[in-house]
Amino acid sequence: MSLVYAILFYLFSLLITLPFLRFIKYSLARFASLFFIILASFALGHFISFKMAFFLFTFLVLASYVFLIRSKFTFKIEKSEIVFAVVFFFFIFLRFLNPSIFDAEKFMDMAFINSILKSPSLPPNDPFFANEKLDCYYYFGHVLGAGIVLLSLAPPEVGYNIAVSALPAYSAILIYGIFEINRKLALLGLIFVLFSGNAYSFVDLLHRPFTGLDFLYYWNSTRVISGTINEFPYFSFIHADLHAHVFAIPMKLFLVSILLLNERKLHPLLTFSLFGIFATNSWDYPLMLLLAVLYGITTRERYIVVYSIASAILVFAYYLTMNLPRTELIFVSEKSDPLEFLGYSATLLLLAYLAFIPDKRHKRLIIYSIPFALPFYFLSPIIPFLIPLIICSAHGILKKDSSAPIIMTALICFIIPEFIAVDSRMNTVFKFYLCGWILLSTGAVMRLKINELGKAKIILAFLIITSLAYPIVATPLRYHSSEFTLDGMSFTKLYGEYEALQWLKERNGIVMEEGCTHGYFCAYQYGGRVAVFTGNPAVIAWTGHEFQWRRNYEEIAERAKDVRYFYTSKDCEEMAKILKKYNVSYVFFGFEERRIFGSDQNLEKCFKKVFESGNAKIFSFGISD
C-alpha cells in the first residue's frame, strides 16, 4: 500500500512540472515547479498554515492548465524524464527494503517535517523545546521535504522516504539537463557527481579480502580526514538523513543549471535560488554567491552579478527574523594531511587534470606551475595539488570558459577550511568539501573532451571503475534487510509503541516524554520519539542539539531536571505543577520511560489514562479526551 504514495508523488510532481515548460526547459522545470510552489508557500505560511498555503499554490498551478490548453500550448514529456523516474524508483526500492527513520539524525529531520506540517504557521514549533519556535535553525530544506510529503498525500512517516528518494531524482535530472547535448558526458556527469565513491573507498575495498567486508566499509569513507566529516552525494543519499546539506544538493545544481543556460529572462531566478540555498544550508550561500559572481564576470554578463548580489536583500531580511546563536570565525592551525585529502578528492582532481591536459595551453600552464606550486606545501600541504588547476581556471575565466568559475569555486571550497573555520573545523570541512565535490565533478565533466583523450581514455576508465566501486559494494551493505514497506515508523512496533504514536499523532498538545535528558548521545538512540512521530512538541528532547541551537544551558538543564523529577516523583501535586509550567496536555509512558524511570504507578494514581496499547500508555492533563 505504501508504494501507492510513491506513485502518487511521481504523478503529481509531473503534473505540476508541465505548466512551467512554458517558461523554462524540461530538466529545470522538474525542480523549479516544486521549488517555487514551496517558496511561495513558505512566504504565505508565515500567515496561515504551511499545509493550507501549499495546497493553495498547488491548486493554482494545476488550474493554469485551463489557460494553457486554451492557448493551445503543447505539453511534452521529454526523454530526460526517464532519468528522473529510474533514479526515483531505484531509491524507493532501497527505502522499501529498509524504511526505518531511526539512527543518526533522522529523528531530528522527521521531527522538523512533522512540526512544519502541524504548526499553525511558520516558523514551526520547536519539536524538542515546547512553547518555543524553530527560529534558531535554518529549516527551509525541511519545508521542501514537507512539501514532498504533501504532494504524495502520504502519512509523514511514509512521505519522509519519498522525499529521500525524490532528492537524488531531482539532482539527477538537473545533471542530465546540463549535459543533455552529449549523452556520454551526461552519463559521466551522473556517475562522478552523484553515483560515485571517493578514492579511499576504492583503496579500502582492495584491503577487504584481508580484513573482511562489513558494515563499516559503507561508513569509513566519510571519515577520511582526521577529526572531520567527509560525505559525498551518494553516501548522503543512501544514508537517508534529510539534513540541510542533503536538501541543498539539488538546490546547488539548480543554480548551476540556471547559470549555464545564461538566458536573461531566467536571471531573476538567481535571486530566489540563492535565497533558497541560504535558507536551507547557510554554509553554501557565500560559496554559491561567489560562483554566481565569478560566472557573471566570466561571461561578461552584468545582470547575473546584479541579480545574484540582490539575493543579499532577501537573505538579510530573513536573517532578521531568525533567533540564531552567534557564529564564530576561527583561524585554524590544523591542516589536512595530504594523503587523507587525496583519499577524499583524488578521483575528482585527476578527472579535472584529465579535462585540462588535452588543451596544449593548459598542459603548458600545468607543467610550468608545478615549481611555483611546491613552496605552498609549507602554507598547507594540500595547496600544491590545487595550484595548477587554479591557474588553469583563472586562465579559463579570462577566456570566457563557462566551466572555469565552477572549477575555481570548487577549489576555493577545499582551500578555505585550511585557514578559516565557522564554529568548528569538523563541520566546515564537511559542508565545504561536499560543495567542492559537486562543483569540481560538474566542472571537470563539462570540460572533458572524450574524443581528444587518446590513450588517456584508460585513465578515464580507471576513474569510472574506482568511483563505481563504492555504490556497487556499499549499497547492499547499507540495505541488507527486506521489510517491504515505506513506513519509516514501523520499527516502533518492536517497542510496543506504534499504535500509541499513531493515536497521539491525530491530537494536538505538548507532550511529556523522556526525550534525552541524561546525556548528549541518548538523542541518537530512542530519545524524543514521541515528538518526532506525532509532531507534538516535547517539554525537552535532544538536549545536546538544543544547546547548540540556543546556547541556553540553564533553561535546558532546568527542563531536563523537571522531566526527571516528574517521572520519579510520588507527589501528584508537584507533578501537576510541572505539567502546568509547560502547558503539557499528554504524558507518555513507554519503552524509554520504563527503561530509565521504572514503574508507572504514580502516573496511574495521579492522572487519567486515555490510551493504552502494547507497552505504551498515554495520560491526559487539563483536557477532555
Image (cartoon, rainbow, N blue to C red):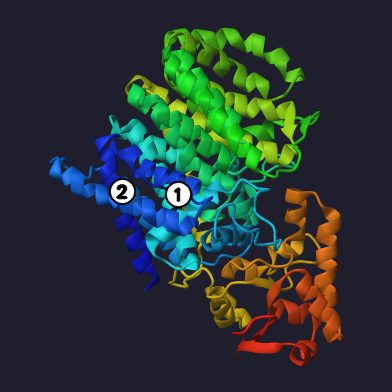
Q: In this view, does 367 lie to the left or right of 331?
A: left
CB contact under 8 Å: marks 2 and 1: no
What residue lies at 47% left-to-right and 71% top-to-bottom? 482
What residue lies at 53% left-to-right and 48% top-to-bottom? 141
Residue 117 on image: x %, y %: 51, 61
Given residues 544 and 85, the one toward you in this image is 544
Residue labelled with disc 2: 61
Residue type at mark 1? Ser
Q: Is residue 98 visible?
A: no
Q: Could you classify mark 2 by the number of other residues whose Cα lies within 10 Å: few (under 14), some (14-19), or many (20 or more)? A: some
Residue labelled with disc 1: 41
| Numbered disc 2: secondary structure | helix
Residue 609 on image: x %, y %: 67, 89
Going from N to C along the chain, the mark reached first, 2 or 1, is 1
Report the number of discs.
Answer: 2
What residue lies at 35% left-to-right and 37% top-to-bottom? 28
Specify the quadrant that holds the C terminus.
bottom right
